[in-house]
Amino acid sequence: MKVKRVEAMMGRPEGLKLIDENGKRLDGRKKYELRRIDMEVGVLKNADGSAYVEWGKNKILAAVYGPREIHPKHLQRPDMAVLRVRYNMAPFSVEERKKPGPDRRSVEISKVIRGALEPALLLEMFPRTVIDVFIEVLQADAGTRVAGITAASLALADAGVPMRDLVAACAAGKIDGEIVLDLNKDEDNYGEADVPVAIMPLKNDITLLQMDGYLTRDELLEAVKLAIKGAKAVYQKQREALKEKYLQIAQEVAGNE
């Protein structure tokens, strides 16, 4: 078990129950229920592609620029595009003001998200170029990396970057001895484990699998299966958000004829 998870559990308020005898969680959800998720595509005019995701109390904005020429030129790859991801939490995104700029955690999550997105992109179609993905966490409430992956995937699709599939993500975890879907802040802080998963649903390919905390082998398998099920529900919302944008475009074009 990681040190931060132990410290969080030790600081848990006395008598706090994360899940009651009826299987209800602090926010009223059932064990296998997602938080409310809303998505919108094409929210930034100055970006090649963009998306906004509200996931519970998380508010995530993603923007994509490229493919475009990369500078300095020695960073070019002759056989494919370079994917750069910058994940950043705004100073006002958490209760205690965060120091502006990148820190160790944001650099780590940037690399994790890049690794989750790369398998879905046809980077070989754009050699010697770069695709930049910027993810801004405007408000954080646990699960920002899976929400960030979800928003970034939408923004890439909105930018017209060729993709094998969208990347959808979700997390499962363990609270009060129970495996549950989509942990909120209190559950993440005081629970026993967190398992973020990202997938390309068409082929059931997993592009991200992490675990923070301690689970038995059977619990881990249960958590992964549950997270995949949640990610597939997120995937449907991604498709609906993209479809909604292009239906609006079609209506505008039809109205101008």
Image (cartoon, helix red, strand yellow):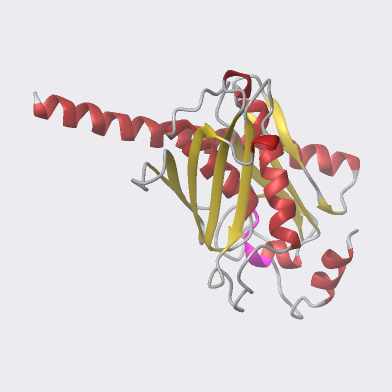
**How many numbered marks have been drawn onto this rendered protein structure?**
0
Q: Is residue 115 above or below residue 141?
A: above
Q: In this rendering, would 236 be left or right of 98?
A: left
Name the spot of residue 1 as percent of width and height, x first.
Answer: 91, 58
- Tell me if residue 24 is in the magenta stretch: no
Residue 104: quadrant of the picture: bottom right
Name the spot of residue 145 as percent of width and height, x first.
Answer: 64, 50
| Residue beneath the point at 88% across and 53% down | 214
| Residue beneath the point at 73% across and 38% down | 208
Residue nearest the observer in this picture, 15 or 186: 186
Which secondary structure dominates the residues rendered in magenta? loop
Residue nearest the observer in this picture, 165 or 62: 62
Q: In this rendering, would 111 be left or right of 154?
A: right
| Residue beneath the point at 66% across and 67% down | 186
Residue nearest the observer in this picture, 47 or 112: 47
Magenta extent = 182-186
Q: In this rendering, would 123 be left or right of 40?
A: right
- Residue 226 visible from this viewpoint: no
